[in-house]
Every structure is written in structure tokens, then in C-alpha cells.
Image (spheres, rainbow, N blue to C red):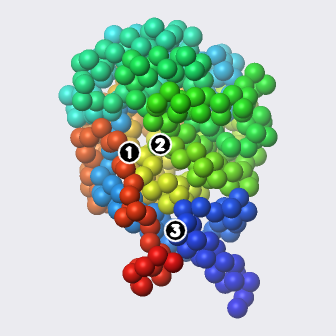
Amino acid sequence: MCGKQHTELGVERLVEKLCRKCSLSLTEYELLVAQRTPKIAQQLAARAVEVRKRVYGTKVFTRGLIEASSYCKNDCLYCGIRRSNCAARRYRLSPDEIVECANNGYELGFRTFVVQGGEDPFFTDDVLCGVVSRIREAHPDCAVTLSFGERSPQSYARLRAAGAERYLLRHETASPELYARWHPSSMSFDNRMRCLGELRAAGFAVGAGFMVGAPFQTAADLARDLKFIELFRPEMCGIGPFIPHHATPFASYPSGSVELTCYVLSIVRIVVPNVLLPATTALGTIDARGRELGILSGANVVMPNLSPVAHRKDYDLYDNKICTGEEVAECRGRLGARMLSIGYQLVVDRGDVAPLSQTNRFETREEQRHGRSI
């Protein structure tokens, strides 16, 4: 057996182990990433889709995204709305405008609203709690998700009490060393991890997530991310390719790949079978069929933009972001048709995390053959 065949056989065994145990060691995750091949990626995607269909069927959940502010006090080196980008066009939606976006989305069939923004000091607890309460009062059958970065435990508790049920805080990387290379010294890896724990303690369904293909990132770094997801088990996980922004220190670095991003999506689906896993806008930005490829790799969420069209280009995290000029109904209609074309359907649903039972656990081919656990 040649070296290539031997390596591929070893990776196939890792895939089988992953499907059997939903867990690998750090070294095994690194090998799974570093020694991937198109054949292995195809196998992994098929297994991930089988897991996803067992838990969620062919439903694709929609989240109505409301980008509330492009002001941010932070200075992350990869982000287009970083504090030091003096050319950024700043805007801030008023509470009335945010509620109006949600009202419009409700009429179009959205039942979850994701209100996100930079870490803008304007959005105090009082302001955000007021927004959340108004949306929940108008639409009690809907879920409200927030994403406003690192806050205090008391803040998270107040937001949860106001009616927000979910909170997205991407950890970006589980490597402290890499985190330090991507962020200013005023931000700390330890604080980001503390916030994730405090969100869970406050009773939120928590969304973590990370970039793929970002500057200085290695297979070992991605292995740390996968192990973190395995152990933390977030209810949601946002994974997208790195895309550079022209006005940041990382402007000259290449984008991450669709191939590697989809490969990682498949692994995460198998590791946490009931995770809510978006096919991100960033994925659709670097490939015209990126979101479809994400769904075919195990994702089950898409996030059309409910923000006013006049401001969408100003929420400029990375270059060439798609869907900045489409009306919401048009975007949702196009997405629905694209999902149908690959055998999935957008649903009018809150899209809550599915409970797992033993019947949701992925059975290996050997188990299926013998009808027993091994």
C-alpha cells in the first residue's frame, strides 16, 4: 500500500471514530484537518447530512438579521468596523427602527430575530432591554437573539430577564496565542471565555463560533476550535471563512476557502448533532453557491438581512459582502428557491435546538450491520 493510500485509510478510520464517539483527541482533530482529501471531505459531508437529517430533517431555519450599529469600541485587526478605521461609515439604528425591522420581518414569516452590532456604548442595558421587551410583546411567538459582544454578568442577566433567549458571541479562536495576534492588547482571550460561561449561567442558549483560513491559523489551531466546540457544546455555532477588509492590517491576506469551511462544518455537525449551524453570508460571499454547499455539508440555518437597505453596506465587516441591495422579501424568496433546488425547504419556525435522545446518536456502519452498539 502506497503512502497516500495508507494516510487516507488512517483518516477514514478517524472519520469512523468521530461518528462513533462524537469526539477525537486534539492530535486526531489536527490530523483530520491536515490530511483531508476530496474523497474524505465527500464522505464526511455525507455522514454530517445523515446526522442533520436525523435530527432536523430537511428543514432550514431562517433568522432575520438586524444589524443595529456599525460603531464599535474595539479594534480587532480583521474587522472593517474596527475603531481605528477612520474611513468606515458609521450608523446606528434607533430602538424604533429596530422594532420596525422586526415587525416587517414578522410579516414575511420570520420567527427569530438576531439583533447584532459592534460594541457600541449607546446600547446600554436599558436600551437593549427596552428593544427586546418591545419585540417580545409584539410577537410573543418569536425568539430574540442578541449579539453585542462582551458585557458583564449583570448585563447578561438583565437581557435574559427582558426576554432575550439566545446570545451569539463568537470565540473566534480557541488558541490564546492566535487570539492575541488577531486582537489588540485591550482584549483578552480569558475574558472572551469568561463571557461565554457567564452567558450560559444566565440561562441563554449560547452561540460560539470561529473563522476558518484566517492569518497565521494552522491545522492545530482549528483542532483546538473543534475540541472547544466538543466540550462547550454551544447551541449555535457560527463558522465562516476569513474574508479580508481593505482598511485593516490583514488586508493583504487571502480569503479562507469554501472547501475547508465546509469540511469543518461537517465535523461540527457530527460532534454536536443538534447544533444550530448557519451557512453564513461570508460563505456565500466567497462562492456564489457557498450557502448551498454549507447546507450540503451539514448546516441548517440561513440569515437573511432585515436591516434597512440604506445601511447594509455600512455594516462592512469584510469586503464584497453579498445581499446589501436586495429587499428582504426578494432575498428570502431567492434563498427559498435555492434551498428547494438542493432538496431542502425554508420553514416558518423559531428553530429551537432539538432535544437529543439515544436514537439521534449516529450509528457506525458496523453498528447498523449488526444492529447493536459496539
Classify residue 31 as left or right of residue 353.
right
Question: In the image, residue 23 lies at what x, y percent?
Answer: 59, 61
Q: Residues within 10 Å of mark 3 (few under 14, many from 20)?
A: many
Indicate the quadrant where residue 32 lies: bottom right
Circle 3 residue = 19
- Image quadrant where one finds the N terminus: bottom right
**Res. 263 in view:** no
Q: Secondary structure at mark 1?
A: loop
Question: Are discs 2 and 1 less than 8 Å apart at CB?
Answer: yes
Indicate the quadrant where residue 296 lies: bottom left
Give the CA distance from mark 3 to mark 2. Answer: 20 Å
Classify residue 71 as left or right of residue 365.
right
Q: Secondary structure at mark 2?
A: strand
Classify residue 42 as left or right of residue 107.
right
* Residue appearing at x 56%, y 42% in the figure: 209
The one nearer the camera, 351 or 308, is 351
Give the vertical position of 319 relative to 310 (above or below): below
The one nearer the camera, 282 or 157, is 157
Q: Residues within 10 Å of mark 1 (few under 14, many from 20)?
A: some
The one nearer the camera, 266 or 71, is 266
Give the vertical position of 173 relative to 144 (above or below): below
Callout 2 amino acid: Met
Question: In the image, residue 196 lies at what x, y percent?
Answer: 59, 33
Q: Residues within 10 Å of mark 2 (few under 14, many from 20)?
A: many
* Residue appearing at x 43%, y 64% in the figure: 361
Callout 3 amino acid: Cys
Callout 1 amino acid: Val
Circle 1 residue = 353
Circle 2 residue = 236
- The answer to which of marks 3 and 2 sits earlier in the sequence is 3
Give the CA distance from mark 2 to mark 1. Answer: 8 Å
Question: In the image, residue 275 lies at what x, y percent?
Answer: 45, 49
